[in-house]
Image: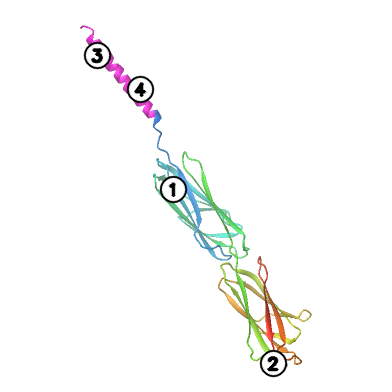
Amino acid sequence: MKHRPFIFALTVAILLLAVLLVQNVLAQSTPTPAPSLSIDKRLVTANLVAGELADYTIKITNNGSGTAHNVLVSDVLPSTKSIYVRSNPMATTVGAPVTSLNWPAVATLAPGASLTYTIQVRVNTDALPGATLNNTASVRADGTASSSDSNVAPVAAPVIRITPDIATSPVVAGQRVSFYAKVSNLGPGRAQGMRISVCLDSKLRNPVAGNPQGSTYNSSTRTITWSHGDMAANGWDKFHVVATVNPALPAGSVMHASWTIKATGMPDTTADQRIKVD
């Protein structure tokens, strides 16, 4: 009986030691809550168009179970094909012209929370259709690896259409005939450095180019050419010609005016205009 207090004390000590051991094992097997950052870089603007503004977004999300500390976001811009305009929140710019952006550190980002950044650039006016703009954003935080996401998008191409028509009715041998072509850019891209030319049938004599002004005439090839410059999406213009119909032509004779549209970085667009003597 005299040993019972000792046995009791020993039993209690063993139980306490077991509890401590279990707590230690549980502490070691339970992971510390950690952040996990994802990044999504997107082009918001429907199309990249030469000479026009383009908007991007960067979204940072903490998908982990722990708070992210000292969150740093940066963005490498497509500086060879665009010009930086603005960002929100305001970023620190690097380079002249601007090649990249760095945002101030965000102290904490809780689990499930997100950050959104916006960037605006202007696509270079000489960016050719099909050229790509590569925009890469990155995020990192204390104790996490850097993550990146890129948006690669092409500069939109124009869709060029030619619609020839005749302004004179009836078309009579020996008299002047007025005809034209309506040139349209259906978009979405800008048509750059457009040159419009028309090669005339020899039966169309003494041609004179009408509006727009500034055309040239090559008598050896019987070709009138207009240097039009750029045409924005949904833009159009009409190119007019007046010529004398060969007086020896009988009714039903057909003359031709061959139209060609050239634009930088695009295949030629052509149309054959048939002009029939009434």
Between the residue at mark 4 and the residue at mark 2, the CA separation in whole angstroms equals 111 Å
Q: Which mark is residue 21?
A: 4
**Chief secondary structure of the magenta span?**
helix
Image quadrant where residue 250 sits = bottom right
Residue 195 seen anywhere in this rendered image of the structure: yes
The three-letter amino acid code for the residue at tag 3 is: Phe
Contact (Cβ within 8 Å) of mark 2 with mark 1: no
Question: Between 74 and 190, which is closer to the camera in this rendering?
Answer: 190
Image quadrant where residue 222 sits = bottom right
Q: Residue at x 57, y 74 (%)?
A: 235
User: Can residue 4 be found in the magenta stretch?
Assistant: yes
Per the image, the residue denoted by label 3 is 8
Per the image, the residue denoted by label 1 is 61
Within 10 angstroms of label 1, few (less than 14), some, or many (20 or more) residues? some
| N-terminal label among 4 and 3 | 3
| N-terminal label among 3 and 2 | 3
Q: Residue furthest front?
A: 252
Q: Nearer the viewer, mark 2 or mark 1?
A: 2
Contact (Cβ within 8 Å) of mark 4 with mark 2: no
Quarter of the image that includes the C terminus: bottom right
The three-letter amino acid code for the residue at tag 2 is: Val
Within 10 angstroms of label 3, few (less than 14), some, or many (20 or more) residues? few
| N-terminal label among 1 and 3 | 3
Per the image, the residue denoted by label 2 is 172
Please provide the residue range marked out in magenta: 1-27
The three-letter amino acid code for the residue at tag 4 is: Leu
